[in-house]
Amino acid sequence: MTVPIYVRVIDTVNIELERMPKYHHGDLRNTLLAIATELLAENGVQALSLRKMAQRAGVSHNAPYMHFPDKDAVLAAIAEEGFRLLTVDVESAISQAGDNTHQQLIAASQAYVNFALNHSSHMQVMFRSTDLAKYPQLVEASQSSLNQLFELVKSGQEQGDLKSSDTHEMTKAIWAMVHGVAAISIAYEPTTLLPGQASVEDVVSKFVNLLLDGLTA
Amino acid sequence: MTVPIYVRVIDTVNIELERMPKYHHGDLRNTLLAIATELLAENGVQALSLRKMAQRAGVSHNAPYMHFPDKDAVLAAIAEEGFRLLTVDVESAISQAGDNTHQQLIAASQAYVNFALNHSSHMQVMFRSTDLAKYPQLVEASQSSLNQLFELVKSGQEQGDLKSSDTHEMTKAIWAMVHGVAAISIAYEPTTLLPGQASVEDVVSKFVNLLLDGLTA
DNA sequence: ACCTGAACACCGTTCAAGT
DNA sequence: ACCTGAACACCGTTCAAGT
């Protein structure tokens, strides 16, 4: 008999259809964060709403409050994830560059700016001003990203490629320069910093070289 | 008879009270922008709403639409005003510094970062990503702010204080560095870039000097 | 514990209507 | 031309209630 089997299949499908949208989300928190990243890429930070996230996850509009105290906390979690993604990109760029300090610094900087341009909404969330005291994990994620650069600078100093002035200061000066390029490029189109037809990579490399070589005659 | 006079005074007051909140706003557009600046300083960019602006101006919640097509345009006008305020601050700092190029550059950079910290919400609006093609006046205001720095760099080059490489590139490299310091300081507390008890001015001066002197050994 | 539905106070924006 | 009031579709957040 094929009919009973057919019925049973339909039954299973119905159970799935009824249960999927309610309750049993294996990991709603991470699902929501993944959806947030999608929505950010699609419509920008302005259009990101908890209600839309919940809708796309197939849960009620206040299910997110089971996992986050408020929208601010969601944004902090998104930012945290952003720093991890950024760190991966930068790390990969560094390891693919040669063992030359200058090359590594430029590769890391280019990766940073490319990440900023390819995930500009995510970047805006990462550098939105917020109460850091409330989100220690966010601070940790951002610091570990910065630490990457610190190690690069330190080894550059040890190899005699960079001046031996304060490593932290030097690291932060590079970070500021590269972040400035990223922030301006996001807000004012990359062409604001480009002279003509140059690529973003060219500009980053030029600016970092200016920093390395100095401006004073 | 004093009674008629008394009555007439009340009458005038009533006319005032009835007419003030309707119609006759001399310059609602600028009133709204001034109120927006107030609200930004009070509650940050997140809490800035057209309806609140209108309420504080004493007009209906859609009176602003007589002067701006939408909220985006209001933000663009606020940004534009911000660049003008910034330009004034930087200009004043430059003129108060000595005639030494390095001193002037550092003074201008310190003024930039101080403006960013003292008007962080305004700064966020100025560097929010938007469709620049829609707001040519905003582009103009930001470019005139950048032009200030360009002139400084150019005269520094002419006096032999700065290398004679591309003036635009050099200008933008300085801008990126200083803006990076500002952006990071706004998002991650100034202390993120400060070593210990140093002042913002110290940090800016140190970073700009690193750029001027170069990092390469 | 995890999720829902109803409710609240707020948005930006549109539109017909008033002067 | 300039402004209003009512209305719409959206928010974030709270809360009592269901499993």
Image: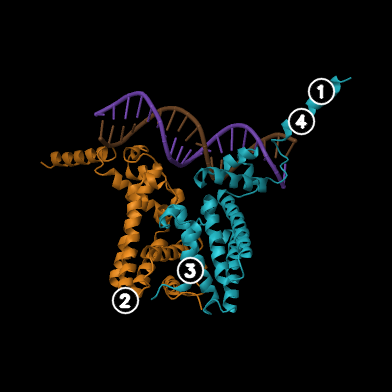
Chain colours: A orange, B cyan, C brown, D purple
Q: Nearer the viewer, mark 1 or mark 2?
A: 2
> Which numbered circle lies on residue A100?
2
Quadrant that contains the N terminus of chain B? top right
Observer-side mark, 1 or 3, equals 3
Q: Which mark is residue A23?
A: none
Report if the CB atoms under discs 1 and 3 are less than 8 Å apart. no
Q: Name the quadrant of the C terminus of chain B.
A: bottom left
- Within 10 Å of disc 4 (Cα), the crowding (few <14, some 14-19, many 20+) is few
Which circle, 4 or 3, is nearer the viewer?
3
Q: Position of residue B144 (x, y in %)?
A: 61, 65
Q: Nearer the viewer, residue B210 or A135?
A: B210
Q: Is residue B97 left or right of residue A67?
A: right
- Foreground label between 1 and 4: 1
In which chain is the residue bearing label 1?
A: B
Q: CA distance from mark 1 to mark 4?
A: 12 Å
Going by the picture, which residue comes out furthest to the left? A1
Sequence-first tag of 4 and 3: 4
Residue type of the residue flagged with mark 1: Val
Q: Looking at numbered disc 3 in the image, what kind of residue is underneath it?
A: Asn
